[in-house]
Amino acid sequence: MFSVIKRPTFEGAIVPTEYMGDPPGEVWTSGRSLGFAVESFWRPSEDDVSRAEARIREVFSSNPIPLQALVGTIALSPEQRGYELREIAKIVAHFGEYRRQYMGVVVSGRRRVLCNFFMKEPEDRPFIGDRWRCDWVAVDDGGFWYWQIQFDVEDDTCTEFRSNGYA
């Protein structure tokens, strides 16, 4: 079971390092599971998570949105830029309607919190249910209801924003 953190503005689960295996399994570190290569894992503290949440809210409410900084290593065409900005606007409009998971990752020597956002489900139509408390949520599809961002704990920045596409 993951450690659940509840605050007035968010609810999420901190993923323990044991979940990834000891040593971390090849499927995680190679990027086949997360979509990017990970050097190692660590467990974020509640303070790390609170800092990440505050910074994400701050960045997503800025005008203009610093999109190039958010997407990091991805080169965006004008069409992709427009798409990402529209997705971010939808995310901002629904920010209180997400649950989160937080995984500590080391990428290129940097300690980051991988923040995994997914929609709170109606109780009469559960898809994920309570699994988010004990298993990493990975969904292919769903658009802005499923997205990730990395928070760099050393320089207090957000990067590598990814919103799911639509089938």
Image (cartoon, rainbow, N blue to C red):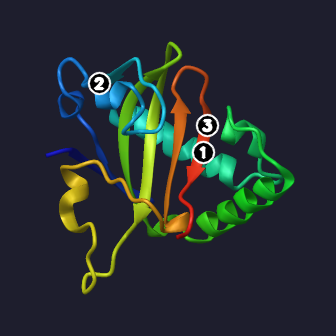
CB atoms of marks 1 and 3 within 8 Å: yes
The residue type indicated by label 2 comes to: Glu
**Dot 1 crowding, Cα within 10 Å, few <14, some 14–19, many 20+:** many
Please give the residue where the numbered disc 2 appears in the rendered image: 26
Distance from label 1 to label 3 (Cα)?
8 Å
Distance from label 2 to label 1 (Cα)?
23 Å
Relative horizontal placement of residue 129, taking residue 98 as reference (left or right): left
**Dot 2 crowding, Cα within 10 Å, few <14, some 14–19, many 20+:** some
> Which residue is rendered at x = 36% and y = 36% of the image?
103
Relative horizontal placement of residue 80, taking residue 7 as reference (left or right): right
Compared with residue 59, is residue 83 higher up or lower down, i.e. above or below? below
Quadrant of residue 44 within the rendered picture: top left
Q: If you read the primary sequence from the N terminus, does the residue marked by circle 2 or circle 1 appear first?
A: 2
Please give the residue where the numbered disc 3 appears in the rendered image: 158
Relative horizontal placement of residue 148, taking residue 156 as reference (left or right): left
Distance from label 3 to label 2 (Cα)?
26 Å
The residue type indicated by label 1 comes to: Phe
> Which residue is rendered at x = 53% and y = 58% of the image?
164
Q: Which residue of the protein is positioned furthest toward the left in this rendering?
A: 1
Please give the residue where the numbered disc 1 appears in the rendered image: 161
- Rendering coords of residue 78 (x, y %): 86, 53
CB atoms of marks 2 and 1 within 8 Å: no
CB atoms of marks 3 and 2 within 8 Å: no
Q: If you read the primary sequence from the N terminus, does the residue marked by circle 3 or circle 2 appear first?
A: 2
